[in-house]
Image: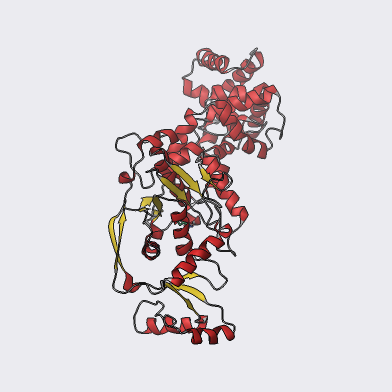
Amino acid sequence: MEIRVRFAPSPTGPLHIGGARSALFNYLWARKNKGTFIVRSEDTDLERSSRESEQNILESLRWLNIQWDEGIEVGGEYGPYRQTDRLALYRNYTDQLLNSGHAYYCYCTEEELEQERQALIATGETPRYLGKCRQLTPEQQAVFVAAGRKPVVRFRVPEGQAIHINDQVRGDVVFESDGIGDYVIVKSDGIPTYNFAVVIDDTTMNITHVIRGEEHLSNTPRQVLIYQALGLAVPEFAHISLILNTEGGKMSKRDGDTAVMDYQQKGYLPEAIVNFIALLGWAPSGEEEFYTLDELSDVFSLDRVSKSPAVFDIQKLNYINAHYIKEASAERLAELALPYVEEMGILPRGERSAEQQQWLISFIEAISEKIAYLAEVKDYIHYFHGEVPLEAEGEAREVLRGEQVPAVLALFEEKIREAELLSGATVKILLKQMTKELKLGGKFVYMPVRVALTGQMHGPELYDIIPLLGRENVLKRLKVTERRYLG
Ligand code: GLU
C-alpha cells in the first residue's frame, strides 16, 4: 500500500518550530517509505486564517527544503487542498451523517449552553453538551427555524463505548465515549469544525498515517467516531510529544524565537534547523548526531519517536548550527552574512567591488569558527573595520601600562609602514621578528599590539585582523591608542 501522509497547518500565524517538526516527521516518513507527502491548509477559522500566514508556512517549509509532492501550489489529484475550497464535499458527508442519524441539528443558544456548562461545573462534572436537541421532532425544529435560529450540526456520540487508538508512538490509548458529549461538526455559518473536516480530508485524500503533535491526541477519539459512523477505515496515528523549554514549561515567545523564519533572519542554516528538530522527539540508534535531510530520510522511523516530551535547548541548536557553519563554503557564508554587514553600513547595499567581496570572504573565514549563527558577525565587525578601536578597559588598559609598550608600538608601526604587502603570512613573520628584535617574550609583544588595535584582550587572530583592517586603519588605530593612553 502506498504511504500517504500530510501536514495540515492552520494558517493563523507563522510556522513555528513545533509545526516544522510535524512537517518534517511526515516528510521523512513519506521519503523513507517512498510514499507521498501532502501539504494542505486548514483554513476554516475564517477570522484568524490568512493567506499571509499560509505563505509564511510554505516559505518556511521551502527554506527548510521540506518539499511536498502534492498539495497547495503543487496540485494533485485529491485537491483542492484548502478547506475553504472543499465546503461542498463536507456538506455531502454532513448530509450522510444527518440521514443516518449519527448527527443532528442543535438549536441551543449560547446562553443556554453557558447555563448548562455552569450547572455541570457547579456539581463537579465535566462540562459537556447533554443532548438537549438530540430528539427534536420536526415540529419543534420548525418552531426554532421560524424564530430565526440558525442550527449547528452535532455528532451523536454513542454511549458506553471504549474508543481504542492504536498509536504508533503511544501504543493502545483508550478513551471513554461517555465523557465526550455531542460535539459540533458544522457551525451555524455552515463551516465545518476541525474534527470533522480533518476526517473528511484524511479519508478522501487516502491518508495512511496521521503524524501530528500530542496536543491533538484528545481530538482523536472524536475523529475516530466519525470514521466509524461513516463506515470508513481509520488511518494509523502517531502523536509526537510536546516540545518543552529547558525549564520544563511550554515553549513560548519568552524562550526565544518560535517562528522558523526568525531563525532564518538570525542566520541559522536550514540544514541545522532540520537536524535539530529531527532530534526533538526522535532519536537515532547510534551515536551520530549530525544528519542531512537525505540521511534522515533513510534512518528515520516512527518506532524511535519518543513518548516523553522533547526539550528545546538553544545551546544544542547553536552547537549544531556552528557545526554546519564550519562545513559551509566561505562564499555561501559571505552571502548569508551580507545583510548584517550591509545593515551596519560596512559594505554598500547592492554592487560590491572585487576588493570588497574579497574582504567579506576573508572576514568570514576569520570568524566562521567562532560564531554560532550569522547575525553574530555583527559582534566581530569592530575588530576588522574602522579607524577607531574600542576603548581599552580594566585588564586591557593595564596591558598598555607595561614599560615595553611604547617601544613595541613604535616598532610595530615602523614594520607596518615598511611591509610591502599585508597578508596573514607577512603579519605572522613581522610579529615574530619583533619579539626577536626586542628580545621579548611573545606575550609582551602580541598583547599590547592586540589591545592597541582592538581595545580587547581576546578576539580573532592578529594575522587575520591586521590584513583586513588594512594599513591605513592599523596606523590610525595606533594613533588613537597613543593619543588616548600614551600621550
Ligand atoms: N490544523 C491542525 C494544526 O495546525 C493540524 C491537525 C492535524 O494534523 O490533524 O494543529
**Outermost residue toward the front?**
99
Which of the 4 quarters of the picture holds residue 349? Answer: top right
Residue 461 makes an appearance in the image: yes
Which of the 4 quarters of the picture holds residue 216? Answer: bottom left
Which residue occupies 48% across, 78% down?
106
Above or below: residue 480 compared with residue 104: above
Above or below: residue 38 compared with residue 150: above
Q: Nearer the viewer, residue 148 or 284?
A: 148
Which residue occupies 57% across, 71% down?
189
Q: State left or right for residue 440 relative to residue 231.
A: right
Above or below: residue 205 compared with residue 133: above
Percent across and percent down for residue 15 are: 53, 51
Image quadrant for the N terminus? top left
Image quadrant for the C terminus? top right
Percent across and percent down for residue 22 are: 44, 49
Q: State left or right for residue 5 relative to residue 287.
A: right
Q: Nearer the viewer, residue 193 or 326?
A: 193
- Label tally: 0
Above or below: residue 25 compared with residue 102: above
Q: Nearer the viewer, residue 361 or 382?
A: 361
Which residue occupies 56% across, 83% down?
145
Percent across and percent down for residue 74 are: 57, 43
Q: Nearer the viewer, residue 360 or 163?
A: 163
Percent across and percent down for residue 244 are: 40, 54
Which of the 4 quarters of the picture holds residue 333? Answer: top right
